[in-house]
Amino acid sequence: MIKKAFIAAVIGILLLLLAVYGYLQYRQYSSYQNSIPRNASLIFKINVDRIVKRKRLNPFKSSSRGFAVPANIFIYNLNNQPTETFFCTLPVTDTALLKQYLKNEFRINQLTEIQPGVITGKSSDHRLRVIYNSSRLILSYALFKEDTSPELERLLNEKDQMIPGDQRVDRLKNQMADITYDFKTYTGAANFNDHILTLNGSFPLEELGVPDSSYQPAKLHQNLSMKMWLNADLRKVLQKDIRFKTYFLEKDSILKYYDGYTAVECGTLLSQYEPVVTYEYNDEFEKVEKKQLKEVKVPEISITCKIKSPALINYLQKQTIISSENKFNKELFPLYQVYSMHNSKLWQLSTNQTKNLSPALQTSPYFAFAAINFEQLRKQNQFPFLNTYTRYLKQLKLKATKQTPTDGKIELELQLSEKAAL
């Protein structure tokens, strides 16, 4: 009797495990259905089930969101839309709950029924837009506030979707990472481990113009909160003249003299002095103007570029970007005083007026590199407007190498604070 009960229990457990396994496999399969349009360009896949499993969360927990969270969430941009605009498609479970969720969580209060059963809405800043019916929700986020409404309507009715068996879908399925990206023939994978995000991947170099030999500063100062460099001519990136307010720079003039290298350093705080006008009364009780200098703490920021000729500086002075006193135009950057210095091969902009222009460069294995200490930036309050956005970040390190004339490799490590919910 005991033996039969034991066998029955084992069979029951096996059947339960098979049911759970089958459900998870179905979640994986269904997540690839009607999720990615064929004209998607850059695709990110977030493996929700993998993250949930590692964090020991309950993937079956019911929700009042009004939409289901699939095994994989895909975020993508489109070939016919700006690269800074991304889209995401999710399955709808309850339109009434979804409407309330969009209002409460995303502050989308402008919801309009454009046709029977089809609702659209947008956030107050016009960056986030949504469209949904009884089966699908599509979101878009446009960094520069493009009106994506026509594209959202097209996507809602789009029938030509990528399906399992398509080359790009198969590549995404084969990547068993927390986050995966796919762009043309390039892929990458990122994983979380004990509040550290690591990413390794490949990406195209055709648009950057990366040279065969790369450089970096020969001597880096200690206690830098930020250091980075980039070796690239950017000819295919900078394709338009630069216009800002009444200022104008011809791209051909910039590219003619730019020599394909920029380095940025950010150190500790330093003092700058700004003139302040006050008023007081003299002995005759007349109101007179009084000028005095006010000390202001600013971050020490230096940007160094290789140039082919000092003629670039002459051009920038002609366009009033740099004054005859070698100061960067404060109307273009009003936060701090920025000073210009140059020689025949290098040009430097710095908030430190006494910083020497060091001509020493050395070869680097990385054509692009960045190291940012967010904790130091916040502690010194160097960029107060960024503190809210970086409060869960500790350190970032990025390295990019040239593998072939057309292919690059990227390695990234991002350390998050213990307060970050992963």
Image: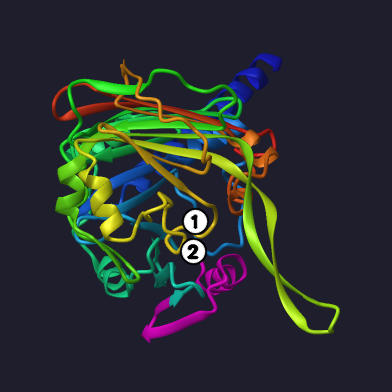
Whether residue 34 is visible? no
Question: Which quadrant would the N terminus be assigned to in this image?
Answer: top right
Indicate the amino acid at tag 2.
Answer: Thr
Within-10-Å neighbours for mark 2: few <14, some 14–19, many 20+: some
In the rendered image, residue 328 lying in the magenta stretch gets the answer: no
The x, y position of residue 160, in whole percent, is 18, 58
The x, y position of residue 47, in whole percent, is 44, 38
Within-10-Å neighbours for mark 1: few <14, some 14–19, many 20+: some
Element assignment for label 1: loop
The x, y position of residue 337, in whole percent, is 52, 52
Of residues 220 and 373, the one nearer the viewer is 220
Element assignment for label 2: loop
What's the residue at 42%, 61% (across, down)?
Answer: 332
Of residues 70 and 3, the one nearer the viewer is 70
Task: Give residue 268's quadrant in the image.
Answer: top right
Going by the image, does 150 lie left or right of 302?
left
Question: Which residue is outermost to the front?
Answer: 284
Whether residue 158 is visible? yes
Of residues 326 and 128, the one nearer the viewer is 326
**Disc sitting over residue 93 in the figure:** 2
The x, y position of residue 103, in whole percent, is 58, 73
Circles 2 and 1: CB atoms closer than 8 Å: yes
Indicate the amino acid at tag 1.
Answer: Ala
What span is colored magenta in the figure?
93-120
Task: Give residue 141's quadrant in the image.
Answer: bottom left
What's the residue at 60%, 65% (across, down)?
Answer: 105
Lower position in the chain sequence, tag 2 or tag 1: 1
What's the residue at 17%, 22% (across, down)?
Answer: 212
Of residues 43 and 27, the one nearer the viewer is 43
Instruction: Name the residue beneath numbered marker 1.
Output: 68
